[in-house]
Image: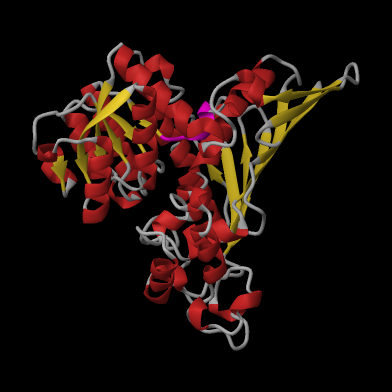
Amino acid sequence: MSAVTLALVGAGLRGQAYARHAIATGAGTVVALAEPDRHRRETVAAEFGVDPARVYESWTDLAAEPRLADAAIVATQDRMHRDPAVRLADLGYHLLLEKPMAPTEEDAAAIAAAAERNNVMVAVCHVMRYTAYTRMLKGLVDSGRIGKLVSVQHLEPVGWWHFAHSFVRGNWRNSAESGPLLLTKCCHDIDWLVHLFGSIPARVTSFGSLSHFKPSEKPAGAADRCLDCPVEPTCPYSAKRLYLSAQADPDQHFWPLGAVTPTFTEESVLAALRTGPYGRCVYTSDNDVVDHQVVNMEFADGATCSFTVTAFTPMEYRRTRLFGTHGYLDGDGQTVRWLDFRTGREETFDAAAHGGPSAADGHGGGDEALTDAFTAAVASGDPGLLTSDAAHSLATHRVVWAAEQARLSSSIVRLNPDGSIA
């Protein structure tokens, strides 16, 4: 089977990761690239060996050409998804579309409609669906090991420093510029929970707020930048500590340090912290997204689900407990403990035994497995190799928007089976 040709639209960290894996496996090759940042554009084009005639500053320049590849990886900033995705779908590209699908229901629906009218595959990067751990856990549920699924508890432990990096100082800090936390971080989780239950919830409600990363919580005497701050040595959110530690560790250069500076010397890191957004005090940034939130869902058969996302944890795998009429499952992102109520038998299952990428890799191997599934689907013309399509991703995104509406209005929101508000 020949390699799938790819156009990379947005050569940031996520786009690079998908493209790099496709190239490494021989499943794909990048033949065109669009990226507005000159340094990144030139560096990534050189790494992937893209013909200079097919390297563009803007996606609009790439899309002005006849179709140049079998598929496109659309990994622009969240609010720049709709236009390139719709235009490229109209040109006949299959799409690997970074999550979230789009910041609004209108934009996401436009992408889904473009996919349908052009009969192209759109795989939104819900990478959690594709991990060996998910396949194992869903297999245990679907096989009836715990009887009927009655309720689920699910925790997304963002991690204190990760939250400060991405959601206080970083690109996803402000809902007007990117979207609410539940969309930008947790559309993964809502989609995954719907995948486990096999249906859209009938009712949803939510609570959450920005409790800590705000001016009222700023320590006495703290400065507006970490490099000037007398409190910095004892602050859990010290940018100086985080990014100089990352500078000393090559494994952290791509992420998180790659978001801060394109060069990884101590001098360049300190210069970025002196003037750039990642050196700001977490208590005086322009962030407004919540730092903790709970979402409660009820399904048509009466099953319930509670989901918690919080900044105030280590950065770890998600934790999930599943309660059934005949048994119990307790998962930590790598292993699942099963208890059978009928016999008292206990057993622990390990995702490593189910094959696939290492759980130490991107999102528990999900980045790699999704890329493999997408390139295989495009190469074979078989959309069945993907676990969801644009319409299904639209439906699970609608659950996110409904939950956020419920949070803002202190209400219970009722949903139709396609995720639209009833």
Would you identify the image quadrant in which residue 140 lies? top right
- Work out which quarter of the rendered image holds the N terminus and state it: top left
> Is residue 381 at all visible to an observer of this figure?
no
- Of all residues, the one furthest to the right in this rendering is 344
Give coordinates of residue 8: x percent, y percent. 26, 38
**Residue 167 in magenta stretch:** no
Q: How is the protein colored in the picture?
A: secondary structure
Q: Residue at x 41, y 15 (%)?
A: 384
Give coordinates of residue 408: x percent, y percent. 52, 59
Q: Is residue 218 above or below residue 159?
A: below
Would you identify the image quadrant in which residue 335 lies? top right
Tag count in the figure?
Answer: 0
Q: Main secondary structure of the magenta part?
A: helix
Q: Nearer the viewer, residue 136 or 7?
A: 7
Q: Nearer the viewer, residue 253 or 70?
A: 253
Q: Nearer the viewer, residue 283 or 354?
A: 354
State left or right for residue 223 relative to residue 34: right
> Is residue 146 at all visible to an observer of this figure?
yes
Would you identify the image quadrant in which residue 141 lies? top right
Q: Residue at x 49, y 60 (%)?
A: 247
Q: Nearer the viewer, residue 228 or 108?
A: 228
State left or right for residue 71 relative to residue 105: left
Span highlighted in magenta in the image = 125-130
Q: Is residue 320 above or below residue 206?
A: above
